[in-house]
Image (tube, rainbow, N blue to C red):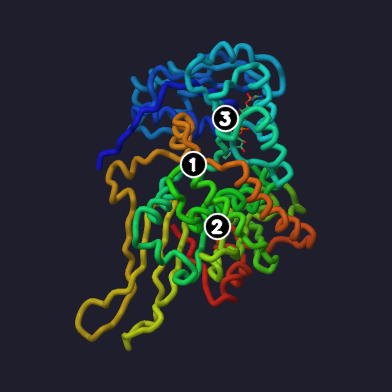
């Protein structure tokens, strides 16, 4: 299969926070890979900006190291690396001060696509937007890319939206949720809306329940102070898991157009029912086998922040009335995996006497690792001995079916940055979506804060707290195994 790499137009991209972890690990190595693939024209320019005093040569040396560390050996080709580094420049800027802005103004070129990536602490998003405007660096065609977290509740998200809106129109603002840049997430839309097969069954008449799991093996070590003020609900559910839920539950948009897709996602968020506290399980990992628990990792012995959350969610609309969505995410779980499992209802009547107790069809969409899809279907057990049934997987790994191209899919950040340059907002969250998500999450967080109870304990390396198992058991269902 031949992949089509369509070059973008020449652009100037300014990365605020270019010396930080995200820029070093993801953004800059990703841009190099896009250059190597032929997607970035060589006349483009990437300007790093941060407070550290450094010249262009110093920045290029840092980026060369990042490429060495974070780009696969077979892609580290000296010629293209040198060409890519030649596209880079650096300006020392304090986002909260006045120095450096006029120098930046002199570096961006008129008439070209201009994008500004805010890869800095969220407290600086507003200040940067203001100063870009104040110093006349952003024009009406400029785009800004805003990292997560976008607020920590409805009030802060609204305030940030208002600040950005006073300098940029909504069509210029790209709020990143890198989950939306994953190949399989976009495939969700392709599977649903480019096939006739699933959509007629995609409702509460035929779907028993949906499970969305985002499990991590890492803990919060290294970013404990930040995480302790956030927790799994704010850090993962409000954005990533809700976006996945939206793509599963939304109505077909009239066209694959940014606002048409985002309108449908917004309707899903607005249809979310308030969650009963009895339908939420919060957990906190405890150490095992010599490794520290959450309280040590966060350096807060009294912390009540959840490193795990599981919840049952209902949508109040015609399509989904009666089908629960179970969401769970956590740190220090037994395997790193992200998947969506759609469990269909059993056939209404079995014509086979020797059926092994009817087993339902399950469609699993794997986001990581090994992106792909798996559909469990019933077949006849091979061989003589009558009509015995068994369940087998129709398993498709994208890397296998798409060959080398499948194994070489662009990372989520690469794809999203190229979308910014192309001016395509489909995979970015709109301001009203973010606010609606916070409006749903806020009362839930306030509810458990008012109750003041501690999260349930779960052992690091386990599948999460016992109570989470009960959340499904009491409905006569069970979670899928967390495994790679
Ligand atoms: P980081 O490692 O702490 O880097 C912060 C960057 O901001 C550095 O380049 C720093 O450089 C610069 N900076 C700090 N204060 C500044 C100021 N006053 N003016 C200009 N530049 C300033 O943070 P990060 O992990 O890269 O995260 C960046 C953003 O991405 C955050 O919003 C984070 O929530 C989000 N994010 C990160 C990840 C990740 O994996 N790291 C994942 C998802 C989202 P100087 O000190 O030289 O100024």
Q: Within 10 angstroms of label 1, few (less than 14), some, or many (20 or more) residues? A: some
Q: Tag on residue 396?
A: none
Percent position (x, y) of residue 451? 78, 62
Who's the residue at 33% across and 53% down the image?
397
Who's the residue at 55% across and 49% down the image?
240
Q: CB at mark 3 closer than 8 A to ligand 1?
A: no
Q: Earlier in the sequence, mark 3 or mark 2?
A: 3
Query: Which one is nearer the viewer's eye here, 71 or 167?
Result: 167
Report the residue marked by disc 1: 258
- Of circles 3 and 2, the one toward us is 3
At numbered mark 3, what does the secondary structure look like: helix, strand or loop? strand
Query: Which one is nearer the viewer's eye here, 81 or 339?
Result: 339
Q: Earlier in the sequence, mark 2 or mark 1?
A: 1
Q: Quadrant of the N terminus?
A: top left
Q: Quadrant of residue 459?
A: bottom right
Q: Tag on residue 333?
A: 2
Is residue 332 at all visible to an observer of this figure?
no
Report the residue marked by disc 3: 144
Check the image and name the residue furthest to the front: 254
Q: Are marks 3 and 2 in contact (CB under 8 Å)?
A: no
Q: Are marks 1 and 3 in contact (CB under 8 Å)?
A: no
Q: CB at mark 1 closer than 8 A to ligand 1?
A: no
Q: Name above or below for residue 269 compared with residue 314.
A: above
Q: Is residue 139 left or right of residue 81?
A: right
Image-quarter location of ligand 1: top right
Check the image and name the residue furthest to the bottom: 353
Distance, label 1 to label 3, CA atoms, is: 16 Å
Q: Within 10 angstroms of label 2, few (less than 14), some, or many (20 or more) residues? A: many
At numbered mark 2, what does the secondary structure look like: helix, strand or loop? loop
Q: Name above or below for residue 322 compared with residue 238.
A: below
Percent position (x, y) of residue 178? 51, 42
């Amino acid at each position: 299969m031949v992949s089509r790499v369509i070059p973008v137009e020449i652009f100037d991209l300014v990365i605020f926070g270019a010396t930080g972890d995200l820029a070093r690990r993801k953004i800059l190595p990703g841009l190099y890979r896009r250059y190597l693939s032929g997607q970035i024209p060589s006349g483009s320019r990437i300007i790093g900006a941060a407070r550290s005093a450094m010249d262009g040569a110093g920045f290029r040396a840092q980026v060369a190291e990042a490429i060495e560390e974070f780009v696969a050996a077979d892609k580290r080709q000296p010629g293209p690396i040198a060409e890519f580094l030649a596209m880079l420049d650096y300006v020392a800027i304090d986002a909260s001060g006045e120095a450096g802005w006029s120098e930046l103004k002199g570096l961006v070129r008129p008439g070209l696509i201009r994008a500004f990536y805010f890869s800095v602490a969220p407290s600086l998003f507003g200040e940067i937007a203001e100063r870009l405007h104040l110093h006349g660096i952003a024009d009406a065609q400029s785009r800004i890319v805003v990292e997560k977290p976008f607020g920590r509740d409805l009030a802060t998200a609204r305030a940030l939206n208002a600040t950005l809106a006073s300098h940029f129109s909504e069509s210029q603002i790209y709020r990143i949720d890198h989950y939306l840049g994953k190949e399989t997430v976009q495939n969700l839309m392709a599977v649903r809306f480019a096939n006739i097969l699933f959509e007629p069954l995609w409702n509460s008449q035929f779907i028993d329940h949906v499970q969305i799991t985002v499990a991590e093996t890492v803990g919060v070590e290294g970013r404990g102070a930040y995480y302790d003020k956030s927790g799994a609900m704010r850090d993962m559910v409000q954005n990533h898991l809700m976006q996945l839920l939206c793509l599963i539950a939304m109505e077909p948009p009239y066209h694959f157009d940014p606002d048409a897709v985002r309108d449908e996602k917004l309707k899903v968020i607005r249809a979310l029912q308030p969650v009963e506290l009895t339908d939420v399980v919060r957990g906190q990992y405890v150490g095992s086998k010599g490794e520290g628990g959450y309280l040590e990792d966060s350096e807060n012995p009294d912390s009540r922040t959840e490193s795990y959350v599981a919840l049952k969610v209902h949508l109040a609309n015609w399509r989904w009335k009666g089908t629960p969505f179970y969401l769970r995410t956590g740190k220090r779980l037994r395997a790193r995996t992200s998947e969506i499992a759609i469990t269909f209802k059993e056939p209404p009547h079995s014509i086979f006497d020797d059926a092994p107790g009817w087993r339902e069809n399950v469609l699993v969409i794997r986001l990581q690792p090994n992106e792909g899809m798996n559909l469990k279907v019933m077949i006849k057990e091979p061989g003589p001995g009558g009509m015995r049934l068994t369940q087998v997987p129709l398993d498709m790994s994208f890397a296998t079916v798409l060959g080398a191209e499948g194994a070489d899919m662009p990372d989520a950040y690469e794809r999203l940055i190229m979308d910014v340059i192309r001016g395509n907002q489909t995979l970015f969250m709109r301001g009203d979506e973010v606010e609606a998500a916070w409006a749903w999450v806020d009362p839930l967080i306030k509810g458990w804060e008012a109750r003041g109870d501690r999260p349930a304990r779960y052992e690091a390396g386990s599948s999460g707290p016992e109570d989470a198992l009960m959340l499904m058991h009491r409905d006569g269902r069970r979670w899928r195994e967390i495994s790679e």
